[in-house]
Image: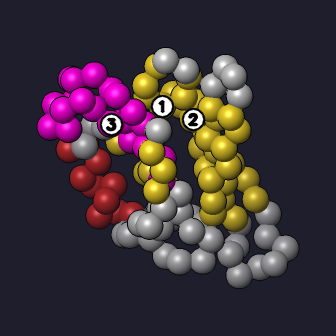
Amino acid sequence: MFWGGDIHSFWTTNLHAKSDDPGSPVVATEFVGTSVTSDGPPYDAFNAILPMNPHVRFFDSRQRGYVSVTLEEKNMLTNFRVISDPQDPHASVSTLKSFVVEPGRAGAIAV
């Protein structure tokens, strides 16, 4: 499991044994969280190149938020949480996307 957050966008990627071979075994999962206040990279530009990156399971730079993680014996649940308006102190929070990683099984499963 790898975590990051310096690109100001949500990402879920499966890391393969050979990075240039998407058919090689998945050996780990990477989650990247966005920021509450800073803008991320241009969504359309990044979204356009996703078909060339099959290891990317999810990407979104349009919304601000944070990552919530629940660790249990059976799995790890990761929720990408988004804020309706980062400038509003009374903004609502909702879940944009969720993934599970199971023990002994590399790779993120969308839920």
Q: Would you say 11 lies left or right of 18 here?
A: right
First along the sequence among labels 1 and 2: 2
The answer to whether any part of residue 57 appears in the image is no
Name the residue: 62% across, 53% down.
67
First along the sequence among labels 2 and 3: 3
Observer-nearest residue: 3 or 14?
3
Amino acid on which the number 1 mark rests in the picture? Ala
Q: Give the CA separation, mark 2 to mark 3.
A: 15 Å
**Residue 47 lies in the magenta-colored region:** no
Badge 1 is on which residue?
108
Assign a secondary structure to mark 2.
strand
Segment tinted magenta in the rendering: 12-32
Name the residue: 38% across, 69% down.
41
Label 3, residues with CA under 10 Å away: few <14, some 14-19, many ≥20:
many
Q: Which mark is residue 22?
A: none
The answer to whether any part of residue 66 appears in the image is yes
Badge 3 is on which residue?
15
Q: Give the CA separation, mark 1 to mark 2.
A: 6 Å
